[in-house]
Image (cartoon, grey):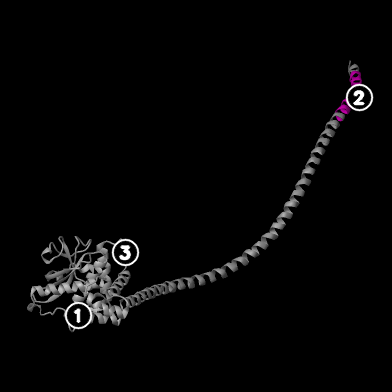
Amino acid sequence: MVELRKRAVGDIRSVGLPILVVILAVLNVSTYVILRNQISTLNDEKNVLERWMNMLQIKYNELNNSFNVLHVNYFELLGQYENLSRNYMVLHSKYEDLNGRYITLQTDYRILQGSFNSLMQSYIGLQKDLEVEKALRIGNSLESYYDYLRQELGFKGVKHLWLNYTENYWQVEADFAAKLALHDLGLFQWPSMEKDYYDAVGEYSYDTARRKIDQTISLIGVGVYDTPTEKIRKTLAFVNQYICYEGDVNDIFLAPVETLGYKSGDCDDFSILVAAFFEAEGIDSAVGFFTNENGEYHAMVLVHLEDLTGYSYYYFSDLTNLGLEEGRWILIEPQRRIEDQGDKWIEQWILLAAAPLDSG
């Protein structure tokens, strides 16, 4: 029995060993095939990776080259930047210096501009004064005419000792003052005395005088569309700038162009001149003679207006008893500007006589 078992084992061993070998061989072959396939796959993957690595290496090299170029450019730009920074600092310093000088020059320019403007205003004023001087100047012939006129007519003017004179005397004097103004407005007043002047000059004295009045009104700057108030304002400003008060030794009445030529006169000369200007500018006017409680004499102008818009003034409601037209007559002190026409000083004067400038 034991022997039989041994034989069976021996038989099994003799049969199983080749089979085992075969099995092992088959397993080895299978394993080999699998491994070879895996190796092939790995080789393929390796080749792919190698290609990728080569591509990456190429790109790396390209990027590295670009980096090197950029690095070089960076240092070049850095050098340029440092140079520019230094240049900027130099230029900025120069700019600050120039800006400071510019501000100084600007200040100097403003000062010079102010001086220039002041000088220009002075020049314009002097030029205006020269024009006025030329316009106001009168010739010997016209001056002699007025002297001869007063001598022939016997009008020497009014005296300050007026209490000895009658009311009629004052009216005669007022009428003569008005005629002097009207003469210089180009109206024929004394025909018998014009021939000698015309023979000497070639025109009538009243034409010469009217031309002077027109030239002066042009210098005053009265416009066609100015209101009466504006005309009065401009006229009084001009007269008080260029005509100064000066008493007469022999107390005569000066014609308007005489007062302009002398650039001076007393109250009656101012009044005759300003009344003539107003009348020439289209404002009805009159020459008035006044007195006060102290027995002093004065002359002023009356204008036939309802108002001096924007300014204070004194007025008479009705002067028809003196031969003036109905309505309000505003009192104008020709030796004062329009802003001062409401002064209390004017209130003291009592009207004695008045003569309108009826220029037709």
Q: Earlier in the sequence, mark 2 or mark 3?
A: 2
Give the magenta range: 6-28
Q: Residue 318 magenta-drawn?
A: no
Mark number for residue 213? none
Percent of width and height locating residue 189: 22, 73
Instruction: Tell me, yes or no, if residue 253 can be seen here.
Output: yes
Q: Give the SS element for disc 2.
A: helix
Label 1 to label 3: alpha-carbon separation: 34 Å
Front in this rendered view, residue 229 or 191: 191
Q: Residue 8 magenta-drawn?
A: yes
* Dot in front, 1 or 3: 1
Count residues near mark 3 (Cα–Cα under 10 Å), then give few for <14, some for 14-19, many for 20+: few
* Dot in front, 2 or 3: 3
Mark number for residue 18? 2
Q: Earlier in the sequence, mark 2 or mark 1?
A: 2
Q: Residue at x 27, y 64 (%)?
A: 230
Question: Quarter of the image holding residue 148?
Answer: bottom left
Which amino acid lies under the numbered mark 1 shown in the image of this protein? Arg
* Dot in front, 2 or 1: 1
Residue tagged by mark 3? 223
Q: Residue at x 58, y 67 (%)?
A: 88
Quarter occupied by the C terminus: bottom left
Quarter occupied by the N terminus: top right
Percent of width and height locating residue 93: 54, 70
Front in this rendered view, residue 262 or 85: 262
The answer to whether mark 2 and mark 3 are in CB contact below 8 A is no
Which amino acid lies under the numbered mark 2 shown in the image of this protein? Pro
Residue tagged by mark 1? 150
Label 2 to label 1: alpha-carbon separation: 180 Å
Front in this rendered view, residue 184 or 71: 184
